[in-house]
Amino acid sequence: MIRHSCSYLLIFTCTIFFIGNSLLAQSVLEVAAEVDRLIDEQTQPSPNDVCNDETYLRRLFLDITGKTPTLDDVLVFGLENHPEKRTKVAELLLQDSDFGVNWGRFWRDVIYYRRSNDQVLLGAASAEQYFRNALNNNLSWDQVTTDLITAAGDIREDGRTALIAAQQGRPEDTVSEISRIFLGIQIQCAQCHDHPTDRWKQEQFHELAAFFPRVALRPQMDPRTFLVYAVDRFRFQPRMNNNRFIGTLEHRMPNFEDPATPGPEVAPKFFINNESLPLGTTDQDRRSALARWVTAKDNPWFAKATVNRVWAELVGEGFHEPVDDMGPDREATAPAAFDYLAGKFADSGYNMKWLIATIVSTRHYQLDSLNRRSYDQLPFQANTIQPLRSDQLMDAILNSLQFPELPERAEDLLRRQFSQTFGYDPNNLREEVSGSIPQALLLMNAPGLSRQITSRPGTMLGNLLNEVSSDRQAVQELYLKTLSRRPNRKELATNLKYIQQVGNRAEAFEDILWALINTSEFKTRN
């Protein structure tokens, strides 16, 4: 298990002066500056300062790679005075394979947290792998979306099946997720009646579901898995849509007056542009057409949905909240900035690395962080403190404590334990994420963690105390290794006083390390 695929110390110092036709070309900085200007124009310029280098570097590492910087990373970055050093280190991190790992897990969670059945988690690992490879290879986001909409195959072998598998191939649930994730529109509220607050009609929802009636999810027993497949001919045609092991030729509207009787057949029609297909169209043509219309440049909701979700993940507050509830009947915060950034993302060819590079280059991303604002406070006045996702928190602990290499099975078990305890749905508002007693108990009582927090030989703390005789320097390095910053004067004085009171150096430092790992600062991205 690799904590970092490389140390950035030498790479950063060797490449900081390189300026050329790189990912973060001058156009990215220009777009970022224009986004800042438009936000300030439509809200109010923030009185808060840009965060210091230590805060920025930890924030950037966690946001891009899901891992914390090393002590050397922090020290070298602080000494560098190049005016574009923040942009350059972002470029390095976007080229690292950990970028795909981190964001692959994010998109896996976006899809699988809204799953209809736990059995479909058999495909979660292949989904993570697909996203990791696609993001590291910078596959355009419209192609990723097309892959997910048109996929077929074994869910344990082909991660592109994730979205359909997570909803067990059910047309209504599948198109609800497509609309929510890739358009930012919750059209599922129109499934049983016209949408109560938006313009969408019940018929439009079922016309969207009519792109997927021939898709089904078939269980396989040896090995245990599921197959996403579609057929265009049936020896026996079910009257209703509820048998999702075989699908149906056409989608039917529900008959609410007589639920036992099937309603009328509905032809596929896309509610954004009103493009339609006739009854009898093959499955491949249906789903290919839907993917084409969803990702079309003249469909502004595709770019907006992605920009809003990624901006919210990085800055802490979306242009729309919740991130998946936009649409023409919703008003955005700073709409000119939102439209501008979404348009530039489309112009980039839906380049995800470009989008992230641009957002982290904005001043609004680099502002000092604060807790979530109340409803009567101005938006975008600070970056917002974010709880670490379970994978990020686990990697932060593994990195900070410099865990020895773990067998793959042991790491998978630990990661599942962290996911069950610290995991949360990334589709939800972050203010809905809160701490819990099981979380505190896991950090306090997990045997593997307890062994690494000791000062015995070979542990991070043991090595530190053996190499550094000065308590002052040891406290400073411990803060850098865990929180990626130096302690302030009060913290340093308090820790030195505590070490003196305890009278046992090893015991005192174990207490300090345990306290740092359990702070809210360690468990959040500031």
Image (cartoon, rainbow, N blue to C red):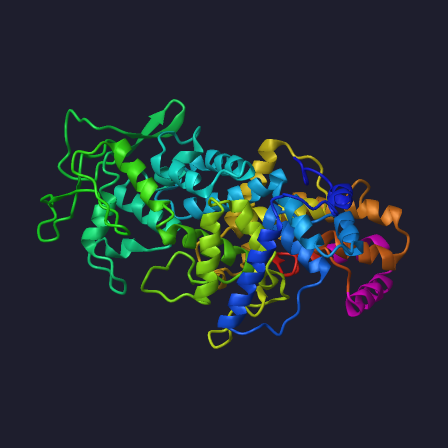
Q: Is the magenta stretch mostly helix, strand or loop?
A: helix
The residue lying at 55 percent from left, 60 percent from top is 315
Vertical comparison of 149 with 78: above or below: above
The residue lying at 45 percent from left, 43 percent from top is 141
Magenta span includes 511: yes
Region in magenta: 488-513
Instruction: Tell which of 261 and 286 is nearer to you.
Output: 286
Q: Which residue lies furthest to the top in this view?
A: 222
The residue lying at 87 percent from left, 46 percent from top is 466
Q: Which residue lies furthest to the right in this view?
A: 469
Is residue 373 at least partly visible in the picture?
Answer: no
Q: Quadrant for the N terminus, please.
A: top right
Residue 423 left/right relative to 326 = right
The residue lying at 24 percent from left, 56 percent from top is 190
Instruction: Tell which of 345 and 398 is nearer to you.
Output: 345
Residue 247: image quadrant is top left
Q: Position of residue 358 (x, y in %)?
A: 57, 53
Is residue 214 at least partly visible in the picture?
Answer: yes
Q: Quadrant for the C terminus, please.
A: bottom right
Magenta span includes 404: no
Residue 32 left/right relative to 148 = right
Q: Position of residue 270 (x, y in %)?
A: 26, 47
